Image (tube, rainbow, N blue to C red):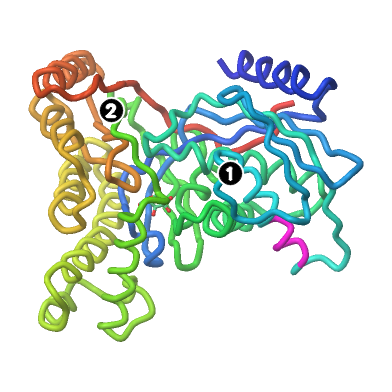
Amino acid sequence: MTDTLIAKVTSGFESKFGYQPTGVWSAPGRVNLIGEHTDYNEGFVFPFAINRHTFAAISLRDDSTIRVASSFSPIIHQVDVLAIARNEGNDWAAYPFGAAWAIQEMANSLLKEFEATGFDCFIESDVPVGAGLSSSAAIECSVALALNELWSVGLDRRQLARVGQMGENVIVGAPTGIMDQSASLLGETDHGVFLDCRTLEAESIELGFAKDGLELLIIDTKVAHRLVDGGYASRREACERGASAMGVTSLRDVSPSDLLKAKEIMDDATFRRVRHVVTENDRVLATVESLRTNGPRSIGRLMYASHESMRDDFEISVDELDTAVETVLRHGAIGARMTGGGFGGAAIALTPIEKISEVSLSVIAEFEALGYAKPEIFVVSAAQGAKREI
Ligand code: GLA
């Protein structure tokens, strides 16, 4: 699969730009096992990089023009490397442009001498778009990794994660956290990335799903989610309101024992947003601990508790996600929850291998009975993070 996509991205580059790329860099999408909407609250997350990737074929140019093209759109987007700004017309190209802008910002602040040149870039990807599997972070990270090398900036992977996030915040205009880019850059085969979003300390934790006869199913509900829409930003604002009411800079500093006080001093909706974040941080820690001591079959209860909290307290689930979660649990999944930013996208189901087919068929049947769009269901495994391919 990887070889085919490398061949496709290379020939895509050649047919658009008329010469060969200098190299091809890849970055994976991610799935979040647990720890949702905790990253921008300086909390804990536990995602992993998946075996679905974006490939970026890139060559530097002699002038200051950036041209980006892809297999999913006929348009070549163009901008001057020194004049990248937020612009609705950028469409998906805002992701590579954002990475190019942010890496310059960082290079200018860290290096004495730095001069960005233009480049040509062609993108190919098998990360589903709009499914909450971070197709956008995969584009940002593949391009950031490439430019870090081609422009000789020398940033480490944590700094590159910041680059991806800055580009997304400023040039795309989505107020997202650091989780997706960290997973895409720090992922390791068969391991989850346990990340403290306050210190950016990351630890690779063995998942051991295959050893225990388990697989992680993705159920893409096909309800498209977009992080630039208002729901994500309004949740973030509620968290900031809650933190300031509690007299702290972020909800990381609110503990479960503070919740009684929180309930007294804020309105009900803000309190429930706060309760989700505070209890979710605890669930991430409990999941990592439980995985280490009792193995993956022990984490199902925590996954479902996370889903309930997102459904009832954070209110970011939709009927299709709830249906997917309830159905897979009835048919043998060990744990399930919606994953990603919410308001659509995918659910995950930790499922014994012998139950995969029953679980998948039951979701398809249930969706059909309820008149929902046909979901796309597939297995993912934990893969290595971004790298240069050729
Ligand atoms: C999106 C954002 C992340 C994170 C999740 C929710 O994926 O990009 O930064 O906030 O939503 O956990």
> Which of these two is toward me, 359 or 78?
78
Q: Which mark is residue 206?
A: none
- The numbered disc on residue 219 is 2
Q: Residue at 51% x, 38% y: name it.
A: 188
**Residue at (77, 29) in percent of width and height:** 23
Q: In the figure, 92 relative to 81: above or below?
A: above
**Rendered residue at 63%/15% (across/down):** 3
Please state the horizontal and vertical placement of residue 251, each as a whole percent of the image: 31, 72
Q: Secondary structure at mark 2?
A: strand
Task: Give the magenta range.
Answer: 103-108
- Indicate which disc, 1 or 2, sits on the residue closer to the N terminus: 1
Q: Quadrant of residue 297?
A: top left
Indicate left or right for 217 with 308 as reference: right
Q: Which residue is mark 1?
A: 89
Percent x, y of residue 73: 58, 26
Badge 1 marks a residue whose secondary structure is: helix
* Labels 1, 2: front one: 1
Q: Amino acid at mark 2?
A: Ile
Question: How far is mark 1 from mark 2, CA to CA?
Answer: 31 Å
Mark 1 Cβ and ligand 1 under 8 Å apart: no
Q: Position of residue 105 (x, y in %)?
A: 71, 62
Residue at image position (53%, 34%) is 28
Q: Position of residue 388 (x, y in %)?
A: 70, 33
State which quadrant residue 118 falls in: top right
273 w.r.t. 247: above or below: above
